[in-house]
Every structure is written in C-alpha cells, then in structure tokens.
Image (tube, helix red, strand yellow):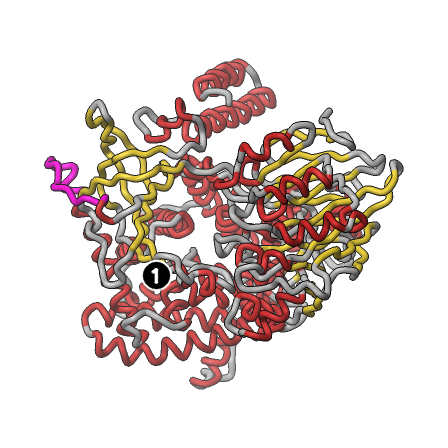
Amino acid sequence: MVPAPAWFGLAAAVQIVAALGRALVARLALAAAAALAGAGWFALRIHEIPAGHLSELWIGAGAGTPLVITVEGMVAEPARLMDPARAPGAMAALAAAGREAHWRVAVDVDRLVADAGPMRARGRVRVWVPCRDAGASFPVAPGERVRLSGELEPPRPPMNPGAPDRRLWAAQDGDAGVLRVPNIALVEPLGAPGGAAWAVRSRWVRLIAGLRAGAASALDAAAGSAEGGGESRAMLAALLLGEYDSAAQDVASAFTRQGLVHLLAISGFHLVVIAWAALGLIRLTGERGGLEPVLVATLVVLYLLVVPAEAPVLRAGAMVLAFLVAEAAGRRYDRLTVLGWIALGLILWRPMDLWSLGFQLSCGIVAVLLWQGRAWHDRLWGVPLRGTLRSGPPGILAAAARWLWGVVKGLISTSVLCWAVAAPLVAHHTGIVSPLAAPAGVLIVPLVTALLWAGYTALALGAVAPVAAGVVGGVLERLASWTAGIVRWLDHVPGTVLWLPSVSAPWAAAATAVALYWFARGHRRERGAWAMTAAVAAWLAVEVLVMPGLSWRGRVRVDALSVGDGTCMLVRAGRGLSGEDAMLWDCGSVRTGMGVRELPRAVRALGAWRVRTAVVTHAHLDHVSALPDVVAPLGIRRVLVSPATAAAAQRDSASVAGVLLRELRRRGVEVRVVRAGDRLRLGAATVEFLWPEDDFAGVSALRINEASLVARVTVATDGGERRVLLTGDIGPVAMGALMADAGATGGAEVIELPHHGSVNPAALEFVQAVGPAAVLQSTGPRRVGDPRWDPLRRGRRWLTTAAEGAVWAEIRSDGEVAAGSLRGPESRAAIGGGTR
C-alpha cells in the first residue's frame, strides 16, 4: 500500500493548486485534496502497524503463523462461558457432544514477556480458555491484571468468496488476534502495577462491568428466569441489553429476513424510544427549556454504559448525542449539515465503517428522513388546514382516535420511505428483499416500542425492587411472545422473502437515486420517472438472469469452499438461471454455524444464487452440519442421501442422520435415496453414482465412510468427454471395489481427494489410477502438505482449502482443465499431467 505520508504530501500539493486556482479549478482541487487526505488517514489507521503493537510479531515470522507467547494486561470485560451446544446452527447441539466449553474474554495487553525480559506492548487479544469444571468461575475479574501464556493466532485473511477481510477490521479495533490458552492454570492473576492512570482505568472497567451485571440481574428478575434460559429471555436480552444467545437465533433470523433486524438489534430506533420516553417524563414536571436535552443526553449515556460497546450501538449513540448537544445549544442549525459532520466524525473514528451496511443505513436513512420525511408525509396524506373551526371540542375517545390515526399515518409514511430507500442497498449487501417490510414494520413497531418501554421500566425497577420488576415481567414475556409469534408468522407467508444473486453497487446506487427522485419530485404521470424506473428494472433483470452465467467460463466447474475440517463443494454445469444446473456436494464443517451466513454468502458471491439439489455422501457432521441452515437462502428443494444414511436415520432418530433428515423435512425438503447406477441431469452434464452397490454390507458405525456416495460428472467438450470424480470419505474397501471395475473409475480430469487427503496405500493407488489433472483437497490444517502425497503432486495442479482458501477446477469448452484458488493465480492443467 502507498504509505500515509505520501498521501498527505499529495493532499498538501493539491491544496496549493486550490489556493492558486479559481472557481471550478479551486473547488475540484479542494475535493481532490480531501479525498487524498482521507486515503492517507485510512492508510495510517488501517494499513500501518502502530509502534509496539503485537501485530509486529508477524513481520519476521510471516503472516498467519501462530506464535507461543506470554503477555500481561488488563481484563477488559467479563468472561463469558461459551457452551458449544448454544452455538449458532441447527445442528450445533449435536455437534457439541464431547466438546469442551470455553471461557472467552478480552484482554488489553501492555507487556510482552520475552526471553530477553518483559517489554512494553499493546493490542487487544481475544482469549479462549477451556473450562473443564462446569461450576468454576473465571479466576480474574474485569479491571484486574492477568498474565496469560498460549498460542496467538493472527486475524485471518478471507478464505471464501464474499467474506470480509477481518485483518482490516482487526487493525481498526486494535485487535491482535486470538490467544488460545490450553489450560486455566496458565491464567495467572497479578497485582496492580500502581499509578493513577491504571487505577482510574481499572475502576472504570469495574464500574461498567458492574452496571452490566446489574442490568442482566434485573432482566432475569423481570423475565422470571434466574438461569437466563428460554427464547423470551434471550429475545429480551438482545432487545434491551444487546446480548445475543443461540436461544433467540430463530427469531433473530426471522427479523432479519423480514427487514426488521433494526428493531431487534440495538440501534438508533432504541435510543430514540429512550429519548422520547425520557422527554415525556421530564415534561410531566413542566417545561425545562435547555435542561431537557441535557437530561435526555444523560439518560442516553447511562444506557450506553450498560449495553456492549459495539460499533452500531456507539454509532447510534453518537448521532443521538450530537443532535441533543446541537439542540441544547439554543441556536438554529441545519440538521442535514449536522448529520454530515457526524458522519465525517464517525468515519474518522472508524474508517472501515464506510463499507458497512449498518453505517450506510444509519446515516443514509436518517438523512432521507430529515430531507424528505415531512414532505413525503404531506404528499401522501395531504397538508392539514390550520385554523379550521370545529362545532365543539371533541370527546376523549374521538381525540384519542384522531391522535392514534395520526400516529399510524406517520408510521406508514415513514416505513414506506425507509423501505424503498433501503431495499436496494440491503439487496446489494445481503441478497435479501423483503417486499412486506413496510407493512410488517407498521405492525411490529408499536409492539416493539411497548416492549422497550416495559423493558426499560422493568430494568429500572429490577435495580431497586426486584419484586416489582417481576410484576412487569409478566407483561414483558407476553409482549415478547406476541412479537416473536407475529414475526414468525410473517416469515412463513409465501413471498415475504426474496433471495437475489449478487447485485452490483452501481445498480444499488441507481435504484436508490430513482427511489429518492420518486419521493422528492416524481409523479405518476411523469414519463421520465417511469422511464428511469424501467431502466433500473431492466438493469436488475440483466444482473439476475445474465450475470450469474458470466461468473465462470467452462462447461463444468467445482468450487471447494474453505470450511476447515469438512467438505462443502458447489458443482455447476450450467448458467445458474434455474437452479437445476447446480448442486452442493456435502455441506458441513466441524465449525458449527458456517451455514448461517458464511456459506450462503460464498455461494452467492460465486454467482450460484439458487441451488436446488444437495448430495449428502454420508452422515458425519463434518459433511452435513451446515446443510439445514443453507436450505432457505439457497432454495434447496431436494437432498440425495446414501442407503446407509437413510438406514441410520431409521434406526436411531437421535443420530446425526436422524437429526439431519428430520431438520430437512421440517423445512419442506424432499429426501431421496440414491445408489450405484442412479443418474441425475445437471445442466449440460450427467451425474452418475458409482458407489455404493446394493449388496455392499460393510456399513457399521465405524465404517460408514466406506458407504460414502461416489459420483462421476460427465460433460461433452470439443476435446471429447471430460469427467469429474467426487469421492466423499471412501476408504480402502470402496476404492478397491471401484478400481476392480475399470468402467466405474474410468479416469477423471478432476478429482475430490478421498477422505480429505487421508493417506493409505489404497488412496495412493486410487489417485494414481484415476490420473487427474487437478486435485481438490478439502481439509483443515492437519492434512496440509503431507509429504506422502508428494510423488502424486508432481505434474498436476493440487489445491488445498486450508492453505489457499476456496479452490476450484473448471473444465472448459475445448476440454482443457483450468484451476485456481481464492488466494492464488489461475492456471491450466494439461490433460494427462503437467501444468502450463
């Protein structure tokens, strides 16, 4: 990257041009200087390592290399016990069997203990410590000093298409990586080093931890659950305190799909509700003038101290507080200008947020409401005539009804405006379009507002009178249950959620501009507005129907996504228009939760926004754990399983196979058994299953790998037929049977390395017999670079997910094989061996 001084030097030079120029030249030069200064600030904040930061350790060791270190620092937040059974993902509870719980805690490092002695250092590390005693507590409290020894892993680069570069976000937050401490004995409490600065900071951290612990206890008292379990309690914790638990995962996903996630996750909406409620209470005591915004701001600050200091919360708090300060100043000001300065300040503070959906929506929606909110409301409902005389004062019921109708009209106009402006941006970032988000918001916002008011009241009462909080708790749980039920009902209504492929940022910008034009100046008789709308719609049709087909150039393509220890392969033999020309070959990982966001995002980034078919080679968690979670976003309609998987599900409904098939059927997926001889049409290719045979009897709990499905994908090219061999986790028995039948194996240009690259004589002989030009190895770090494969690596392209991220191989129209990876160059692998 260009260093920061170079950017700042260019900015200064352009400013000289601006000073000497006139009119348009000066303005353009000033704009360019601002952009160059912004680039310099970004380089300084994100790309350059501060002196003494722990990230300097990798300058000599190489990026991505874990290091064994000992550090000292302050515990920055309360330790959280991470139960594997409460991880995200439909099959997380099953995957948690036999896995240890872990403590997770953040530590601000101030000293690195090296062989030459201690030295000053800085950076925040996220510490993971195994918890082998369920009743134990973490030995160090927030604000206390600690010494830790373990293996420090740096922030990882993106390993799959569409994934964010966590290294950039870590640099922004001062995050040095994950410190994995193997034993709680290596967590050593230390005494305070002394000094006023340390004492003040320590007391501040303890104060914040105490406030948050008190708020959590008050919520438990109000929700009637000291254990903190149940969906209602989890939903209330997310809504009021910003604490997320897997118990609320389903309802949180429904909120997201319906375009209502801003109502559940703490955002500006929550702070506005707090401000309204506080202002109403203050005005019950009379007019307080300039004191009102000061009191409201104080209450907002107290709330920000209670909730986690996440970026969306802090961003919303900064915006609300800035407007309150402007209001308290007692001077006239332009709110859009104030918002512009707030946005600039937020970007200076966190430059990476410029590319985040949360920042774009937060600032963008508020700007639109300030600019067109009142005007659009008047256009929609008309401007009420002032000074109209009525025959007499209305009754209480009539006045209440009139006020309520005014609130409903305001809610409708605001919801429609926000949805229309936000929809293109949300579609660009997530691929989700929620057509009923506006009416859903009209229905849900009053419930959530009432829930927030009741919740804040319960938190206040719980802090002083837990018994009184329990009375409010009944109302809280009922409101939470109603809200969750309505959102779930909306989520099951057909057409409330549409999934799109990856749409471009220029289209999102153009669609947003057209929407803004309609609200600002458009009229239903204006031909120009309709022409712009038609152009944007045609552009979207091209991106949805044409662009996915241009995302790759061959006849057959296999993408092996990086899932650690596990397998998830996307196989395509068409242009992605129907979803019938793409399939998933397994979809799992030992890291649960990958199917919630990462895998759908990766498949969408590859252009395969609809995948109708998935194949489960065998029922091991590392091959199936993410499959139920990707059903909805990828539109999976049928899953093909082996006879062994179907038999295992029938024998034991609590087994991996049983849970998998039950989850799939609950989502409306057709489950079909396939075996050797069955065929499937996949776009221009044919998928033929080669194994297992009907009479194969070697299946047992320990040998289920041998019953993995094996399939050959065959496609015609100008150079003749070409084949891809997909092998699952087959072992020596299956390999021997396949090699005994020469017609079954028949050679292949691309092969999935059996059982993630597990080495045995049969596997070596099998790959040699197939003679592929490209080998795709989906594995974790344990099997990377095994030297026993070296003789077979020569003369062919060998790609490993753990080392290179997502990898791919493609059979082109001329019959050649191309291969590459997310982190490496593309190359052509010649048929019959060799790479050119």
Q: Picture coordinates of residue 143 (x, y %)?
A: 19, 47
Residue 671 forms part of the magenta stretch = no
Q: Is residue 197 magenta?
A: yes
Residue 771 vs 294, above or below: the answer is above
Q: Amino acid at mark 1?
A: Leu
Q: Left or right: where does residue 818 sit relative to residue 410? A: right
Residue for badge 1 = 241
Is residue 260 depicted above or below 729 in this figure?
below
**Number of numbered labels in the structure image:** 1
Q: What's the magenta region?
A: 186-201
* Viewer can see residue 15: yes
Q: Between 668 and 513, which is closer to the camera in this rendering? A: 668
Q: Residue at x 43, y 84 (%)?
A: 396
The residue drawn where x is 34% and y is 61% is 241
Residue 535 % position (x, y) = 77, 48
Q: Nearer the viewer, residue 257 or 180?
A: 180
Question: Percent position (x, y) of residue 217?
Answer: 25, 67
